[in-house]
Amino acid sequence: MAELLPLSPVPLYTQLKELLRERILDGTYPPHSRMPSESELGKAFEVSRITVRQALGDLQKEGLIFKIHGKGTFVAKPKAFQNVSTLQGLGESMTQMGYEVLNRLRSFRHVPANALVAARLQV
């Protein structure tokens, strides 16, 4: 396991949160899998349970994990998002993120163009 740096100016709970975020995003903890318990994480990273609780609380606020009372902490299903700094279609961006995109024609009909539309389309 990676080690946290106790003498770092970055708080331990922030270090732990970033490390757990990396593991969630790289698939070490896959979606809907159960995370180790607070005490297990505390022992593994040699930090207090309060430190673990703070890190998990922040990850829960970010939507990366969810808790079920009496069951434990689970990894949330990844949310779809689109980087708006580059122009891409929705299908193209979802495909790049590994999602399967299906396009279906739901209906088809001819609609006569009104005068304004016909003039702008030059038809």
Image (spheres, rainbow, N blue to C red):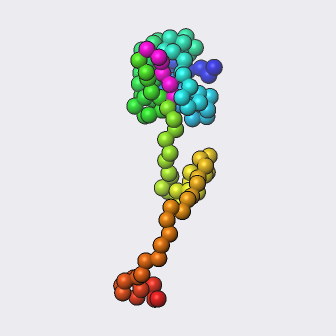
Q: Where is residue 99 in the image (x, y as percent from the top left)?
A: 59, 47
* 87 within the magenta span: no
- The reply to whether residue 121 is visible in this rendering is yes
Of 10 and 98, the residue lying toward us: 98
Q: Write the residue at 41% across / 24% down.
A: 57
Query: What residue span does the magenta drawing correspond to?
Result: 70-75
Q: Position of residue 32 (x, y in %)?
A: 54, 29
State left or right for residue 25 relative to residue 121. Answer: right
Q: Write the residue at 61% across / 32% down.
A: 27
Q: In which quarter of the image is residue 117?
A: bottom left
Of 45 and 36, the residue lying toward us: 36
Q: Write the residue at 50% across / 56% down.
A: 85
* 72 within the magenta span: yes
Of 107 and 54, the residue lying toward us: 107
- The reply to whether residue 51 is visible in this rendering is no
Q: Quadrant of residue 22?
A: top right
Quarter in which the N terminus is drawn: top right
